[in-house]
Image (tube, helix red, strand yellow):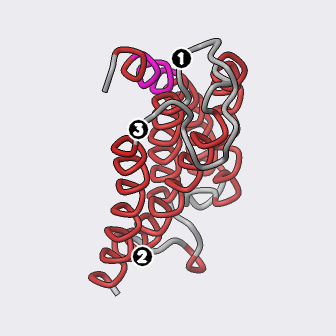
Amino acid sequence: MDETDLAGARDGFRAGAAGVAIGTGIALAAWALSALIGDGAFPAYLLGPLLMPAVSFVAPLWRERPGHRRPATLVALALCLPVMVAATALGDVLEQGPDDGPTGWTGLSYLAMLLASSTVFGTLAGPPGAEPGRSWLRFTGRGRRYHLAVYGGLAAAFVLAVGLVAATG
C-alpha cells in the first residue's frame, strides 16, 4: 500500500468516523427517549437515519477524488452485503427484538458497515485531483495484483459471511 492509499484510508476513516459519531448520537438519544417514554426497546425505524449523516462526510471525498471513484464505490457498496449478512446472522443469535424486529445490535452493525465502507472507499478512490477512471471494474493505472487483492478480498468477505450464516444457522 503506497502513501496515497494510506492517506486515502485515513481520509475515508475520518469521514466514516464523523458519520458514525453523529449516527451513534442520534441512536442513543432516541433510545433514551424510548426508555423514558416507551418500552425501552431499540427504535427500529432509526436504522435508516443512522446511515444518513455519513453521506455529508463522504461526499467531499467523492468530489475531490474522481480518479477511481466508480470502482471504489462498487467495491465499498459490495462490501456492505457480507457485513449485513453477518450482522443478520449474529443479530438472530445475540438478541431478538420485540415482534422479531431489528435490535440495537443491528444498528451497531450498520455503523460498523458505514465505517468499513467509507474507509475502503477512501483507500481505493485514488489521490485527490486524479483524472477520472474509465471503467466500473478496473482501477486505471493499477496492476493485476492490485485488482486480485481488491476483488479477492471482497470474494473472501462473501465466503466468510456465508460461512458464518451456515455456522449459526
Residue type highlighted by circle 1: Pro
Query: Marks 3 and 1: which is nearer the front?
Result: 3
Residue type highlighted by circle 2: Asp
Q: Quadrant of residue 6?
A: top left
Which residue is the site of mark 1?
A: 127
Residue 25 drawn above or below residue 110 = above
Which range is magenta?
Answer: 7-14
- The x and y percentages for residue 44 are 64, 60
Is residue 152 on the magenta stretch?
Answer: no
Within 10 angstroms of label 1, few (less than 14), some, or many (20 or more) residues? many
Which residue is the site of mark 3?
A: 143
Residue in the picture at 40% in, 63% down: 155
Residue in front for this viewpoint, 90 or 121: 121
Instruction: Please tell me which of labels 3 and 1 falls first in the chain.
Output: 1
- The x and y percentages for residue 163 are 31, 77
Residue 35 drawn above or below residue 39 = above
Residue 9 drawn above or below residue 167 = above
Horizontally, is 66 left or right of 18 in the view?
right
Residue in the picture at 59% in, 61% down: 39
Is residue 8 on the magenta stretch?
Answer: yes
Whether residues under marks 2 and 3 lie with C-beta atoms below 8 angstroms apart, the answer is no
Which residue is the site of mark 2?
A: 92
Query: Marks 2 and 1: which is nearer the front?
Result: 1
